Amino acid sequence: SAAIETNVSYDHNDFRLKWSGQFENQKRAYARLILIVPLSLALMFLLLFWNFGNFRQSWLQMATLPFPVFGGMVALNLAGMTFNVSSAVGFIALFGIFTMNGVLMISHINYLRGEGAILKKAVIKGATDRFRQILMTSTVAILGLVPASLSTNIGSDVQRPLATVIVYGLAFGTIITLTVLPALYYMLERRYLNRSKSEKL
């Protein structure tokens, strides 16, 4: 838009250039997203804290969000699509699904530890127990959106970025949830336990 305003020649005293239609609506949507995205992330963190009851595990789950974002951005780039309002909405939905999978994993590990399992065994068993549930949940969501991500029909310019972000971001994020998240949980909790023991001594 800035390039067009620079290259278009007109008398500023008699005329003025005003954007309208789809471009104007897009600018309004971007302005709303600047507010909505931080609020969504803040709400997610509060819900995580309410569920886990501590900051460290809440931050752990939030710290893994860049992984599905990376998967979604790479997919957009490879598909020749740009980041727009539709893809931004897709990222918000992706955050929710990815976080839900992480909560399933961490909550089960916490449950096993509460039943008396030592940290290492709880992490291994928790990751094993939740492997199938998380994989199936993500697979169903991905398969349901694959047609939309490949669509070329009327309106696909809106639905394709959203679906592409969720499909590929969730695919990459699920791998992280099943492999990296348990390892990060183990390292974080082992460090916390060691620090607690040293403080008691």
Image (tube, helix red, strand yellow):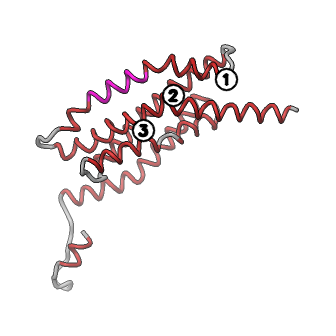
Q: Mark 3 highlights which residue?
A: 95
Contact, CB < 8 Å: mark 2 with mark 3?
no
Q: Is residue 81 left or right of residue 57?
A: left
Q: Mark 2 highlights which residue?
A: 103
Q: CA distance from mark 3 to mark 1?
A: 27 Å
- Write the residue at 23% across / 42% down: 160
Q: Amino acid at mark 1?
A: Leu
Above or below: residue 72 compared with residue 3? above
Residue 27 x, y percent position in the rendering: 29, 59
Which region of the structure is painted magenta? 134-144
Residue 98 x, y percent position in the rendering: 43, 33
Locate the N terminus and report the quarter of the image it occupies. Answer: bottom left
Q: Secondary structure at mark 1?
A: helix
Locate the C terminus and report the quarter of the image it occupies. Answer: top right
Magenta span dominant secondary structure: helix
- Write the residue at 48% across / 43% down: 41
Q: Mark 1 highlights which residue?
A: 119
- Residue 182 found in image quarter: top right
Q: Residues within 10 Å of mark 1 (few under 14, many from 20)?
A: some
- Labels in figure, total: 3
Q: Amino acid at mark 3?
A: Phe
Above or below: residue 108 compared with residue 66? above
